[in-house]
């Protein structure tokens, strides 16, 4: 147990550096933790479970016995007895019970941390979605402005007889299509806003961030994972359950030891009084049948579950880590190429000058806008991966 605690303390010191730097959307996370109703309820439930873990932690209740007898015939007189006793478990049983109660208290805290991490991650992902939809909304706002100019241009040309009805209709359909897509983006953004308000627990919560924060990638997955694994509350909860199962197995074995009771006894008859100490012994012949076997099976199942989930989490995190590396490179190359080769302004001028057809313009413009949206798609996925990778450090 000491080695685990030392490892966690060492890990906390390590993560206080680069890995545990200011998380993305830090102010939002503070507000979520302070106001989210699910988190507040989970915290109270954890406190109640921690208190309940120590219910019955003291000695068993003392037993008091009293008896009153009258003789037959009456000349025999009366007799009354009094007995007070206290039962004790063996020290090995008491130690294991105390250890099990401490593990139950830790499990309640870890349950809360699992819910807390999931809620904070959901808030971060919602913020990432809001930035993403805001960016797409700005792209479609520019597209709408361009589509309006094109529709007006071809309306004037059609009225002057300089274009065909096909070009006029195509310009009008392009405007309707772009406006419809812009409305869908606005709807998605509104849904993300409502989700954030729900998570923060505050109506009309202001969120003005419009750019993603810079992300970096660690040089080695293995060394990064070794530090990260000890902070995972889900794995720590499974480890706690495995440790509790081992402790329960030890307790079941120890409970085969007899339970002692010590007390005071008094017997009073006519003209005579007897006082002394009484000692009892409770032998667990029936109550512990198959308890050790059941505890052994539970311990094996908990250990297997921990190993299985650790392997699953390792594999999932490794795939995400390498995907994160790839996307980070892709975003940089896409942004550089787009900034160097973006010719959307030249297309607008060429269309107005009649140097290219409407069909050519729409085809080329759609290509440039799709590349710009692709950059945001990749950046959005990169941000989501980063938030997932570092969610357990929150």
Image (tube, helix red, strand yellow):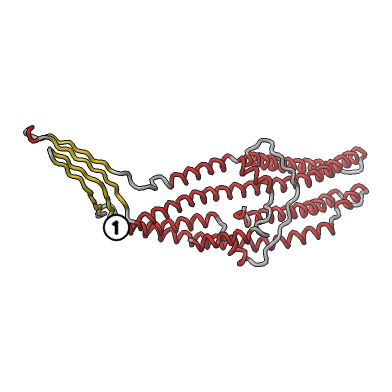
Give me the residue at 75% from left, 52% from top: 373
Which residue appears farthest toward the front when viewing the image? 271
Which residue is more in the foreground, 187 or 126? Answer: 126
Depicted 207 relative to depicted 385: above or below: above
* Badge 1 density bin: few <14, some 14–19, many ≥20, Cα 10 Å: some
Which residue is more in the foreground, 366 or 207? Answer: 207
Query: Looking at the picture, how far across and down is residue 79, in whole percent?
Result: 15, 37
Indicate the secondary structure of the residue bearing disc 1.
Answer: loop
**Is residue 342 toward the left or the right of residue 14 in the image?**
right
Place residue 232 in its image quadrant.
bottom right
Which residue is more in the foreground, 144 or 201? Answer: 201
Query: Looking at the picture, how far across and down is residue 33, in whole percent?
Result: 61, 44
Q: Which residue is mark 1?
A: 257
**Is residue 105 toward the left or the right of residue 186 in the image?**
left
Depicted 268 relative to depicted 313: above or below: above
Query: Looking at the picture, how far across and down is residue 299, in whole percent?
Result: 40, 59
How many marks are shown on the rendered structure?
1
Query: Looking at the picture, how far across and down is residue 389, in whole percent?
Result: 63, 57
Give me the residue at 12% from left, 39% from top: 271
Depicted 217 relative to depicted 282: above or below: below
Give me the residue at 81% from left, 41% from top: 172
**Is residue 268 toward the left or the right of residue 151 in the image?**
left
Which residue is more in the foreground, 292 or 283? Answer: 283
Place residue 197 in its image quadrant.
top right
**Is residue 35 toward the left or the right of residue 238 in the image?**
right
């Amino acid at each position: 147990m000491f080695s685990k605690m030392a490892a966690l303390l060492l890990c906390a010191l390590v993560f206080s550096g680069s890995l545990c730097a200011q998380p993305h959307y830090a102010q939002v996370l503070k507000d979520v933790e302070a106001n989210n109703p699910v988190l507040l309820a989970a915290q109270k439930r954890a406190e109640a479970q921690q208190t309940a873990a120590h219910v019955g932690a003291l000695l068993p209740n003392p037993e008091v016995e009293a008896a009153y007898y009258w003789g037959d015939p009456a000349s025999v007189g009366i007799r009354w007895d009094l007995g007070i006793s206290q039962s004790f478990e063996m020290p090995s049983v008491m130690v294991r019970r105390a250890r099990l109660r401490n593990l139950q208290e830790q499990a309640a805290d870890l349950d809360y941390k699992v819910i807390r991490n999931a809620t904070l991650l959901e808030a971060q992902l919602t913020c990432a979605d809001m930035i993403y939809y805001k960016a797409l909304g700005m792209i479609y706002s520019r597209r709408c402005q361009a589509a309006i100019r094109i529709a007006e241009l071809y309306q004037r040309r059609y009225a002057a007889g300089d274009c065909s009805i096909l070009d006029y209709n195509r310009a009008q359909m392009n405007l309707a299509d772009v406006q419809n897509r812009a409305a869908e983006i606005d709807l998605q953004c509104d849904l993300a806003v409502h989700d954030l308000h729900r998570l923060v627990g505050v109506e009309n919560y202001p969120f003005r961030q419009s750019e993603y924060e810079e992300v970096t990638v660690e040089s080695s997955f293995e060394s990064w994972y070794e530090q990260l694994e000890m902070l995972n509350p889900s794995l720590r909860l499974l480890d706690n359950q495995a440790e509790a199962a081992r402790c329960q197995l030890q307790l079941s074995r120890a409970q085969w030891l007899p339970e002692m009771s010590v007390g005071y006894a008094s017997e009073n008859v006519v003209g005579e009084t007897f006082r002394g100490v009484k000692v009892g012994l409770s032998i667990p012949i029936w109550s512990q049948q198959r308890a050790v076997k059941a505890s052994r099976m539970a311990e094996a199942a908990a250990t297997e579950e921990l190993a299985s989930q650790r392997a699953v989490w390792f594999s999932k995190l490794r795939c995400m880590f390498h995907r994160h590396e790839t996307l980070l490179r892709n975003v940089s190359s896409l942004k550089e190429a787009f900034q160097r080769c973006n010719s959307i302004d030249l297309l607008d001028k060429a269309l107005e000058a009649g140097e290219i057809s409407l069909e050519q313009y729409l085809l080329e413009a759609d290509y440039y806008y799709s590349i710009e949206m692709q950059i945001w798609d990749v950046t959005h996925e990169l941000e989501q991966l980063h938030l997932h990778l570092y969610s357990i450090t929150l």
